[in-house]
Image (spheres, rainbow, N blue to C red):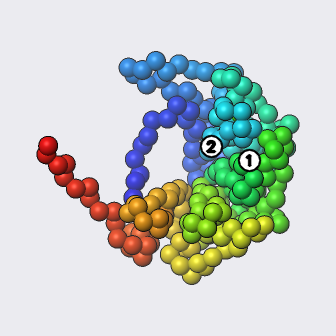
Amino acid sequence: MMRNVKVRLLVLPLLLAGTALAQPAAQIIAIPGTTFTPAQTELFDKPNTYSNAWADFDKDGWLDLAVSTQSGEIRLFRNVHGKFVSVGAEMGLPTTGKESRGLSWGDYDGDGWPDLYSGSADPKGVSSLFHNLDGKKFVNVAPEMGVEFPGRSSRQSNFIDYDNDGKVDLYATDRIGKNKLFHNEGGKFVQVMTDGAVTVFSSTVGACWFDYNKETDWRVESSPASEDAIRAEATIAGRLGPPPLPLPPPTET
Ligand SMILES: [Ca+2]
Ligand SMILES: [Ca+2]
Ligand SMILES: [Ca+2]
């Protein structure tokens, strides 16, 4: 389990559980010894932002940025040759609603255009799957695709082709209930392994997938939010398989 702190260029502050206090704005961090400098602070210096995810949603060769917020707005910044422009509202993404966390990009329908999944942190809300219409518009298809996940408090989701059938599947973590794995049936997601290790409750705030033994069988590890959950998580990891083997010592030449 990895729970280390990573230095990132764009830092989005977390909301403390149970608080309604205004959070500091997103920040551009200058790392000592580097030449990083703040960029477009008039655009990014907004409070109460949570997750962020990069993808070239319009396939122009420049990475774009999606940011979720406490207000439910999902901001989308189009990268126009190194200059960011806010386009979320005109692209059909929500400007208000339930607190949103856990953005993930993935081409669920295989049309070559990355789609966006957003989770509601408020269990009274639902998650949204925004279908990317040729880089020109986003339309929420979560109800017909079966991934609204009501009652969830979202922190992170992953698009992952866990069964290597060529279609990306969806793993959605839950802070207050059981995580869910949805298999992509083509035109519909269906929850699978409902009584398996990937579905147990562990108050999850983060999850990542990796092929640790290079045999194309995926492993998932999630980051629980409490010490009790950490102990539960160790049990989950045990069910999924042995821990990764240590690297062999270097060979002398
Ligand atoms: Ca782009
Ligand atoms: Ca797509
Ligand atoms: Ca699959």
Q: Position of residue 13 (x, y in %)?
A: 57, 39
Q: Nearer the viewer, residue 135 or 68?
A: 135
Which amino acid, by three-letter code, is at mark 2?
Ala
Q: Position of residue 38 (x, y in %)?
A: 57, 20
State whether residue 131 is above or below residue 150. above
- In the rendering, which numbered label is found on residue 15? none
Residue located at (63% from left, 40% from top): 54
State whether residue 122 is above or below residue 189. above
What is the quadrant of residue 1 in the picture? bottom left
Name the side, left or right, on which 55 lies relative to 163.
right
Name the side, left or right, on which 86 lies relative to 191.
right
Ligand 1 near label 2 (Cβ, under 8 Å)? Answer: no
The quarter of the rendered structure image containing the C terminus is top left
Q: Nearer the viewer, residue 159 or 24?
A: 159
Asked if one can make out residue 215 in the rendered structure from this viewpoint, the answer is yes
Crowding around mark 1 (Cα neighbors within 10 Å: few <14, some 14 to 19, many 20+) is many
State whether residue 36 is above or below residue 65. above
Q: Name the residue beneath numbered marker 2.
A: 53
Which amino acid, by three-letter code, is at mark 1?
Trp
Ligand 2 near label 1 (Cβ, under 8 Å)? Answer: yes
The reply to whether dot 2 and dot 1 touch (C-beta < 8 Å) is: no
Quote the CA–CA distance across marks 2 and 1: 15 Å
What is the quadrant of residue 82 in the picture? top right
Q: Position of residue 198 (x, y in %)?
A: 53, 71
Residue located at (57% from left, 69% from top): 163
Q: Nearer the viewer, residue 115 or 45?
A: 115
Residue located at (42% from left, 66% from top): 215
Q: Position of residue 125 (x, y in %)?
A: 76, 60
Secondary structure beneath disc 1? loop
Asked if one can make out residue 94 in the rendered structure from this viewpoint, the answer is no
Residue located at (45% from left, 35% from top): 7
